């Protein structure tokens, strides 16, 4: 329950904190990372696209199968060549700043540590709906990772270029629902 309240409150802050411009300098367009379910090139059409297979090539996409901590997210980010800074706000909430993502400013992720994968998925889904279109995040095992609001195009580029979509289930809020962009990490 405490984690739910903390995550809800931190999700409210997601709109006002960090950079609203998550464009990665020099990165290709989002369409370079996406395809239709039939394998044709595509732009960001939520609910109609998936990541191209090469986005996660070479990364183990097997479910975690164990409870995780924010350090697991940090370790993956570092394995992708990004520098991080962490601030542990509580035992169940950690802020992870990605310092060299290619954006104008550091990107702050809010990592909520919940009791189960189901709780983490539900919390992320709820937070995305509360914040609205352009909010995105990742869920892996018992972790719900909320990213700053941006355009769906910039979210796809960041999640693909940094291979975050290969670490956790990649979700983006649409107008009135959340959409998983498949092709990366999947957890049932």
Image (spheres, grey):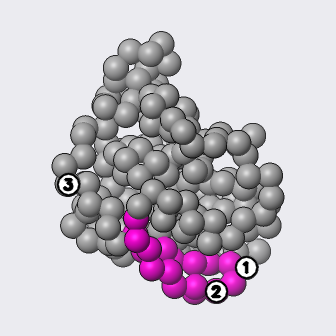
Residue 90 is tagged as: 2
Q: Secondary structure at mark 3?
A: loop
Q: Callout 1: 10 Å neighbours few (<14), some, many (20+)?
A: few
Q: Callout 2: 10 Å neighbours few (<14), some, many (20+)?
A: few
Position of residue 33 relative to residue 130, above or below, is above
User: Picture coordinates of residue 184 (x, y %)?
Assistant: 55, 38
Q: Secondary structure at mark 2?
A: strand
Residue at the location (51% across, 35% down)? 57
Q: Are marks 1 and 2 in contact (CB under 8 Å)?
A: yes
Position of residue 122 relative to residue 177, above or below, is below
Residue at the location (43% across, 20% down)? 36
The verdict on residue 81 being magenta is: no
Residue at the location (62% across, 61% down)? 144
Can you tell which of label 1 and label 3 is closer to the viewer? Answer: 3
Residue 2 is tagged as: 1
**Earlier residue among tags 1 and 2:** 1
**Earlier residue among tags 3 and 2:** 3
Residues under labels 1 and 2: Cα distance? 10 Å
Residues under labels 3 and 2: Cα distance? 33 Å
Residues under labels 1 and 3: Cα distance? 38 Å
Q: Secondary structure at mark 1?
A: helix
Q: Callout 3: 10 Å neighbours few (<14), some, many (20+)?
A: few
**The magenta stretch spans which residues?**
82-98
């Amino acid at each position: 329950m405490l984690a739910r309240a903390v995550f809800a409150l931190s999700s409210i802050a997601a709109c006002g904190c960090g950079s609203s411009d998550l464009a990665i300098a020099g990165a290709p367009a989002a369409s370079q990372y996406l395809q239709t379910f039939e394998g044709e090139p595509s732009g960001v059409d939520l609910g109609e696209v998936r990541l191209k297979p090469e986005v996660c090539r070479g990364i183990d996409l097997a479910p975690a199968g164990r409870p995780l901590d924010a350090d697991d997210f940090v370790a993956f980010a570092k394995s992708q060549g990004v520098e991080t800074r962490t601030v542990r706000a509580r035992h169940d909430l950690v802020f992870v700043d990605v310092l060299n993502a290619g954006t104008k400013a550091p990107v702050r992720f809010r990592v909520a540590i919940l009791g189960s994968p189901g709780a983490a998925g539900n919390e992320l889904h709820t937070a995305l709906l509360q914040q609205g279109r352009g909010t995105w995040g990742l869920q892996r095992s018992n972790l719900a990772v909320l990213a700053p609001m941006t355009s769906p195009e910039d979210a796809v580029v960041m999640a693909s270029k940094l291979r975050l979509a290969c670490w956790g289930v990649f979700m983006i809020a649409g107008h009135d629902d959340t959409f998983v962009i498949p092709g990366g990490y999947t957890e049932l």
